[in-house]
Every structure is written in structure tokens, then in C-alpha cells.
Amino acid sequence: MVNVALTSTLQFLSALRALKVVRCRFDLKHETFLFAGESGLGKSTLINSLFLTDLYPERVIPGAAEKIERTVQIEASTVEIEERGVKLRLTVVDTPGYGDAINSQDCFSTIIAYIDDQFERYLHDESGLNRRHIVDNRVHCCFYFISPLGHGLKPLDVQFMKAIHNKVNVVPVIAKADTLTLRERERLKRRILDEIDEHGIKIYHLPDAESDEDEDFKEQTRILKASIPFAVVGSNQQIEAKGKKVRGRLYPWGVVEVENPEHNDFLKLRTMLITHMQDLQEVTQDLHYENFRSDRLKRGGRLSSHGYVLPLSPAKGPEPEEMDKDMILQEKEAELRRMQ
Ligand code: GDP
């Protein structure tokens, strides 16, 4: 767990401050983002750039032999940002080594099991007594990293996105955009979108801005929508450019600035993350979690008297009948208190 001090997150917070709605909307909310894609595409670096923290200071990059041996591990890390009583909790889950293991199905099943496990826990908590204090660890969004070196999606990319698209909001990202010229970048974006369409992959669609929103917000939403898949650059280094210290990558011909919208889509991705948290949560609840719940019902789960699906495995908690009884008891007690 990584706690980020207020001082080290000034840039991120200033973006939050620019959005006054954030304060009331995300108070005590818990957001989980999954960063998936082949290892070496820059996922950890981007997370570090986004949250200005070194998520894996002691990370050891495995050698080739080790990569062949291992399957995917899920590493989770929580970033907590606090400002005047407002808590923003973002759990970032990185999946190093995806695509490294010999059996790609292993990679998929580990990640799918992780997503399902969070749904299962939520279902369990929702059916339990203390529903008010449920910690929502469900995965709200998966940023899927695509290699800039291919001419579009690899078969593994297609398989992976199809395996998760009914479980989580998928946002495709072109990694290491500094390795592409502007023309190549635009061509790759178009190609990826065409292939996503051809293969029937369902990615997260940003909702249009409401008609009563201000013009700036409408324009921002339009630009964000047109920029997917976001072509991003990440860096852990501060570099001197034009007399300022900026986060960037230094090349013999100049500096690629991470936070320069003319250089890449990093800022757009971050803006989307902030402005669309609420929507990502709603789609997760109304679409993905509902799919999971109804699937559970089909597989023999039972509805409690409150309309909640009771978990299949009683080993994780009290017996379903007991939970039902407890809930009825609790409601009766509450009613008695009201009458008193
Ligand atoms: P991960 O395995 O996907 O988490 O990848 P890492 O974040 O560990 O990055 C792997 C390598 O790619 C490191 O040497 C990074 O410095 C480099 N890298 C990360 N982001 C970028 C980028 O945007 N552009 C370029 N050219 N290299 C990057």
C-alpha cells in the first residue's frame, strides 16, 4: 500500500480542484483501475506518472528464463489522496508479465478470476448485515496497453479484450507513443478502432455531455472521445526543458513532455479518469455487476427477501438462510426503534 502525501500530488490535485464536482461526488469513494497488457509496455511507468509515486521501488525485472516459467501475478497497490477531509482512494492493479507466460489462457484466467473475485466479495457484502460500510473493490476500468510496434491488434489483444469486455470497462491505450510519428499514430489509432469494431469488442464509450453542461465541458468531452485509443508517454524522470522542470523523456533531438497535450494523450487519459469516475462506477454497477449477478442467479444462486443474490459458497461467510434471518431481525429492530 502506498500512501501519497498531499505535497507530492500537487499536479493531480490541481486537476481535481479544477473539477469542483469531484469533492462531493467522490467523497470516500473507492476506485479500482486495472492496467493490463504485455510486460515492458510502460504500465508501471504510466501509473507512476499519473499518481506521482513509485509503485514498485523494489521491483525486480525478471530475466527471460524466469518469464517463461511464471504465469501472471496480480499486484495491487492503493494510492490514497486526501484533501480537507475528502478521501480519494484509487487502487491500481498492475499485471506484469501478461503475454510472457507460455499459456495465454493462464493469463486470462488469473485476471478474470481477480475481477470476478471482487464482484463475488461485493455480492457477499451486499447480502450481509453491514451493507452501509461496504468497501467497493470492484474493478471500474481496465486500461489495456497495445504495443506501438505492431500494425494493429495482435491476436492475443483481441482474445484478452473479448475475454473481459463483459466484466469491466475497457479503455484501449497505445503504449510508448513517442516511438511513433504523428502520422503513424493516427494510422494506428484508426486501425485499432476498425479492428475493435470488426471483432465485436465492446470498449468503454464516454457518454456525450448533457445539453445543459457548459461549452468547455462539451468540447472537452468531444476531444476525449475522439482521442481513444489514448496514445500515451510515461516517464519517471524530471527533465529541464525550456527553463522548466518537466516530467519527460530525453532524446538526442529533444524532450518528449509527458504533460504536453501536443506531444501525447497522457493529460487526456488523466482528465478522463477524473471526469468520468462517476460514469465508470455507474456502468460497472448497472451493466457489469448486474451481468455478474444475473449470471449467478442462472447458476443457481438465490435471491434474499431483499432482492440480493445470496452467494453460492457459504464457506466465505454465514449460511444464506442465516443471513436472511439476520437481515429480517435487523429490519424488525430498526422498525421497533422507529416506533419507540
Ligand atoms: P511494464 O512492464 O508494462 O510495467 O513496463 P515498465 O513501466 O516497467 O517500462 C518498461 C520500459 O519501458 C522501461 O525501460 C521504461 O523506461 C520504458 N518506458 C515506459 N514508458 C515509456 C514510454 O512512454 N516511451 C518509451 N519510449 N519508453 C517507455
Image (tube, grey):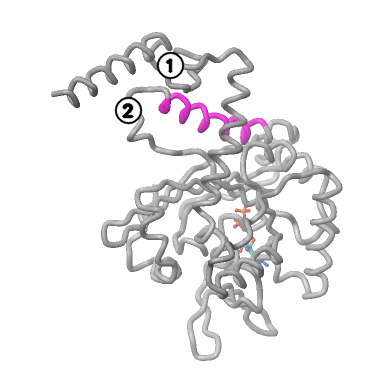
Q: Quadrant of residue 177?
A: bottom right
Where is residue 7 shown, x and y percent of the image?
33, 68
Give the quadrant of residue 230.
bottom right
Q: Position of residue 208 (x, y in %)?
A: 63, 60
Above or below, 294 against 161 in this view is above
Packing grade of label 2 (10 A; few <14, some 14-19, many >=20) is: few
User: Residue drawn 41% across and 10% down?
Assistant: 319
Which secondary structure, mark 2? loop
Is 88 magenta? The answer is no
Q: What distance separates the C-alpha of mark 1 from that of mark 2?
A: 16 Å
- Residue extending furthest front? 339
According to the picture, the residue beneath numbered tag 2 turns out to be 130
Which portion, as a residue range, is magenta? 109-126
Q: Residue at x 52, y 64 (%)?
A: 49
Circle 2: residue type: Asn
Circles 1 and 2: CB distance less than 8 Å?
Answer: no
**Mark linked to residue 305:** 1
Depth check: 279 or 272 in front?
Answer: 279
Residue 209 visible: yes
> What is the x, y in percent for residue 225?
67, 63
Q: How many marks?
A: 2
Identified at 43% across, 38% down, the residue is 136
Which residue corresponds to the image point at 39% horizontal and 69% vertical from the top-left? 17
Task: State whether residue 176 appears in this view.
Answer: no
The image quadrant of residue 224 is bottom right
